[in-house]
Image (cartoon, helix red, strand yellow):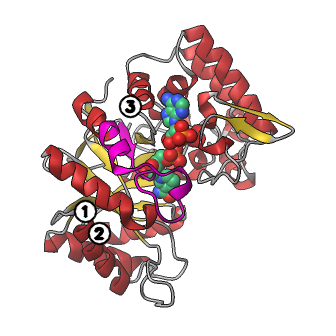
Amino acid sequence: MSVDHYFLLGRSGLRVSRLALGTMNYGKAGFHAPFGKTEDEARPIFRSYLEAGGNFVDTADFYTAGQSEEILGRLISESGSRDRVVLTTKVSHNTDPGNPNAGGNGRKHVIRAVEDSLRRLGTDYIDLLLLHVWDTLTPAEEVVRTFEDLVRSGKVRYGGFSDVPGWYAARAQTYAEAHGLNPFVALQIPYSLLGREIEAEYVPLARNLGMGIMGWSPLGGGLLTGKYRTGDRGVTGDGRLGREGAVWTSPWQADERAWHIVGVLEEVAGGLGRSMAQTALNWAVTQPGMGAAVVGASSVGQLEGNIAALDFELPADARARLDEAAAVAPRTVYAMFTTAYQANGINTGSKVGDKPRGYAPPLWHG
Ligand SMILES: NC(=O)c1ccc[n+]([C@@H]2O[C@H](COP(=O)([O-])OP(=O)(O)OC[C@H]3O[C@@H](n4cnc5c(N)ncnc54)[C@H](OP(=O)(O)O)[C@@H]3O)[C@@H](O)[C@H]2O)c1
């Protein structure tokens, strides 16, 4: 496996690198400004990714108040890589407070947001458009139809979801299938050793409905790199999480459980002669259902180290130790049809594996 070894994203013909380059830290404005990079700082990171053969880049209209898209658009243009790159962006956030239709997932906003993104990115099409976050209001059918129109207009090649409830993604995909509309091919959700909650619902959803998972914050925003410590002064270390008033964008806290996982990761990585970041990334991208890990970097050195995470195989005993340290207990309903009950054949009278061939729905990915 390497970054220039391309995999099909979900049930699509789109070929992408296993490591996608996150650009949430390109730019110096808005919510992400405290850890943002200037265009000159971002350029060598982006170039190194391309030179290594990476083709999957991720941004959003809301990152650094639009600057991420602007910078990325210029970097793509000056490197002449528009055709090579699978350009992903997202819409949902309100970019014009006070105007209720300048945010959310209604048709009026999504179409306007795409026009704005195209302008900032300096291109006439987006390869992968993701609904950034569930707005709790817009019917799934409206989103499907809006994405369909965007694809038909040529402004978008593929659609996907990010941070929506499982039932919502399933309803949208089923509606699209039932009406012969373009399917959603990706599901971007948080995934790292610090947080495996998606495994119960989203991984089977994505595998059954043909969506490749794009796991975001696979390093927990940097916590899994080993550069942070905890103490009286809270989290300390040389990085964005160690600063006074640090902005946490990852959903996982630096709590006792997290430090336990970090400790085990340090031992496992040491035993393999690999960095903690490489070990954590390799684990994440090779988990079931994973299309790609969306990783950020603030220097070329970090990026190169992260790309090297793809060039080794995680031994089974190392994975088992990490799995155990990062295990999450299944919630009530899930426990009824997972390990404890299934192992004994209590709930269904037989184990899932005992069912005749053809009982399980097809797995489209991984
Ligand atoms: N869909 C969504 O809702 C959503 C949400 C969040 C993020 N994302 C996407 O996911 C991408 C990644 O998110 P993220 O930046 O939060 O998570 P991450 O990839 O887990 O963490 C990246 C950060 O960790 C540090 N780092 C990376 N490699 C390192 C290494 N080898 N050694 C030491 N430190 C290293 C850097 O921070 P320092 O500056 O501190 O060194 C870097 O910015 C974003 O750019 C964005 O595209 C999507």
The crowding category of the residue bearing disc 2, from other C-alpha atoms within 10 Å (few below 14, some 14 to 19, many at least 20), is many
Q: Which residue of the protein is positioned furthest toward the right in this rendering? A: 232
Q: Are marks 1 and 3 in contact (CB under 8 Å)?
A: no
Looking at the image, which residue is at 64% across and 25% down? Answer: 322
Q: Are marks 2 and 3 in contact (CB under 8 Å)?
A: no
Range covered by the magenta-colored residues: 19-45
Looking at the image, which residue is at 39% across and 22% down? Answer: 308
Is residue 124 shown above or below 101?
above
Quadrant into which the C terminus falls: top left
Estimate the x, y position of residue 349 in percent, counting from the top left: 67, 42
Quadrant into which the N terminus falls: top left
Mark 1, residue position: 121
Disc with the residue nearer the chain's start (2 vs 3): 2
Estimate the x, y position of residue 45 in percent, counting from the top left: 34, 37
Camera-side residue of 291 and 262: 262
* Circle number at residue 117: 2
Disc with the residue nearer the chain's start (1 vs 3): 1
Q: Is residue 138 left or right of residue 255?
A: left
